[in-house]
Amino acid sequence: MPSKKEINLLLRHRFIIKIILNLWTVLTFTLFIIDFFSGHRFDTSTTAIEVVYLTLLGIYISDKEYERWRDGFHSRFFGEFFVIAWTLLMVIFVIITPMSDGQFKVPQDFAVVYASVIAAFAISQHSKALKKN
């Protein structure tokens, strides 16, 4: 069983990772919206931010699941909010695209990020369910 000092250090570590991930989530979300409505003038930037965002998401989820299995970590936050936000943006893009007569197109990098967020959430949920059993 970890000491109180170790637990506080782990919580601070996770808090810092969560702040960084949230910052990059907002930046990534915003850049994809700007890229979509600008006719993909920022597609090079979306490729770069996609790599950073997915890497940070992977680090956060890996760290969280490791702690869940090691110490019985229980999150007070819900990954569903990330999934809902990314899904709403994808739905908006998919609805606007055919209505725009070719002016707007779903960024390919966005589709990769969206699918990765859904996959990461599913894997995390399966891990959580396995740990309960």
Image: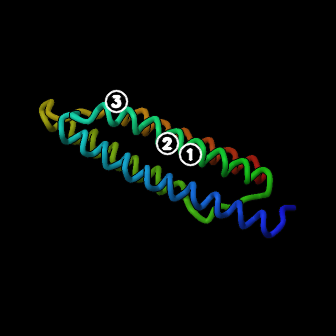
CA neighbours of label 2 inside 10 A, class few (<14), some (14 to 19), many (20+): many
Circle 2 is placed at which residue position?
117
Residue contact between numbered discs 3 and 2, judged by CB atoms under 8 Å: no
User: In this rendering, would 128 be left or right of 111?
Assistant: right
The residue carrying pointer 1 sits among few (fewer than 14), some (14 to 19) or many (20 or more) residues within 10 Å by Cα, namely some
Instruction: Determine which residue is flagged by label 1.
Output: 121
In this view, the residue in front, 19 or 127, is: 19
Q: Earlier in the sequence, mark 3 or mark 2?
A: 3
Vertical relation: 76 (above or below) 92: below
Rendered residue at 28%/39% (across/down): 94
Residue type for callout 3: Gln
Residue 121 appears left or right of 94: right
**Residue 46 on image: x %, y %:** 34, 36
Would you place residue 112 above or below residue 30 in this image? above
Q: Residue at x 46, y 35 (%)?
A: 51
How was this image coloured? rainbow
Judging by the rendered image, the residue that carries numbered circle 3 is: 108
User: What's under tag 1, amino acid-wise?
Assistant: Phe
Residue 16 badge? none
